[in-house]
Image (cartoon, rainbow, N blue to C red):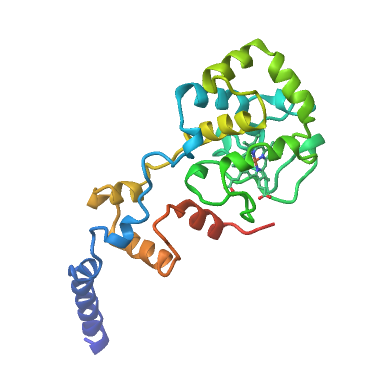
Amino acid sequence: MPLSRLVAPLFALAFALCAGTPATAAEVAMTPTKDDMKWLLPKTPPSPADNQPSAARIELGKQLFFDPRLSSERNLSCASCHSPLFGWSDGLPTAKGFKSKVLGRASPTVINSGYTTIQMWDGRRATLEDQAMGPMESMDEMAMNLESLFTWLNSNPSYKAAFAKAYPGEAIDKTTTSKAIASYERTLISADSPFDHWLRGDKKAMNASQIRGFRLFTEGSPRTGSPTRTWVVSRSSRSLS
Ligand code: HEC
């Protein structure tokens, strides 16, 4: 018998024995470390002191988010570009806005946007409250005349009642409209992945290779303890247009 016929199976056996030993698994601690735990999202995103969530605020924000009457041609709502049918985006390479104009940038998902500390691809908005009126005012997006928007909202009985419940004694204006939309957006949460389960204590939710990958991916990230996980993940997997 040629030597190679003997040697090859021996190598295969030795390789299988090595691969089967727990050495590789042992290299990776399966329990989340203190650093790993920094990526655990709080149950709900933090809300500003002057806009603590309530059922009435969230419900009003939801109505506004899905209402195309907030656009000049009454055909575009926030949900046109951030649709639950498309993972709270639009399934397009870049967004389509006012009169179907193809815009320069893609619509990001708004899932977990309540956890991020900057908004928009270039981070030009700090909070969801800061961001919410932008699309209505933009001539490329909802192209709404704000004066007529607030005249209409103030004369609509159903919205008047909803605003009075959500923000009693406050005007129906940019401030309360943005606050309501932001309150709703903070309820759009995804925290049920194997990774989330692993951080919450289920050691079997991730395997050794996944844990190693996570630690490599986040190594040296400038985390300060604030939950910017979704920013790091989404921004690094997509490029600016
Ligand atoms: C015509 C499509 C379109 C409409 C309508 C629209 N958006 Fe967007 N949205 C975008 C695009 C495109 C971006 C990214 C723009 C950029 O970074 O310059 C964006 C970004 C955002 C972001 C930032 C998310 C992140 O992760 O940075 C939020 C929040 C958001 N939109 C909420 C809203 C709300 C609230 C409305 C309704 C008032 C709305 N959008 C209406 C297309 C749209």
Of residues 87 and 56, which is closer to you in this image?
A: 56
| x then y, percent, for residue 182 | 55, 35
* Residue name at image x 45 percent, y 54 percent: 229
| x then y, percent, for residue 56 | 49, 21
The mark total stands at: 0
- On screen, 76 above or below 2? above
- On screen, 57 above or below 42? above
Tell whether 200 sits left or right of 175.
Answer: left
Q: Quadrant of residue 122?
A: bottom right
Tell whether 58 sits left or right of 100.
Answer: left
Of residues 146 and 3, which is closer to you in this image?
A: 146
Farthest residue, direction top? 157
Tell whether 86 sits left or right of 22.
Answer: right
| x then y, percent, for residue 187 | 47, 34
Of residues 229 and 27, which is closer to you in this image?
A: 229
Q: Quadrant of residue 39?
A: bottom left
Q: Quadrant of ligand 1?
A: top right
* Residue name at image x 42 percent, y 62 percent: 223
- On screen, 39 above or below 102? below
Q: Is residue 2 visible?
A: no
* Residue name at image x 56 percent, y 26 percent: 62
Farthest residue, direction bottom? 3
Farthest residue, direction front? 169
For the C terminus, which image quadrant?
bottom right
Q: Quadrant of residue 154?
A: top right
Tell whether 179 sits left or right of 21.
Answer: right
* Residue name at image x 38 percent, y 47 percent: 41
| x then y, percent, for residue 78 | 65, 33
Q: Is residue 145 visible?
A: yes
For the N terminus, which image quadrant?
bottom left
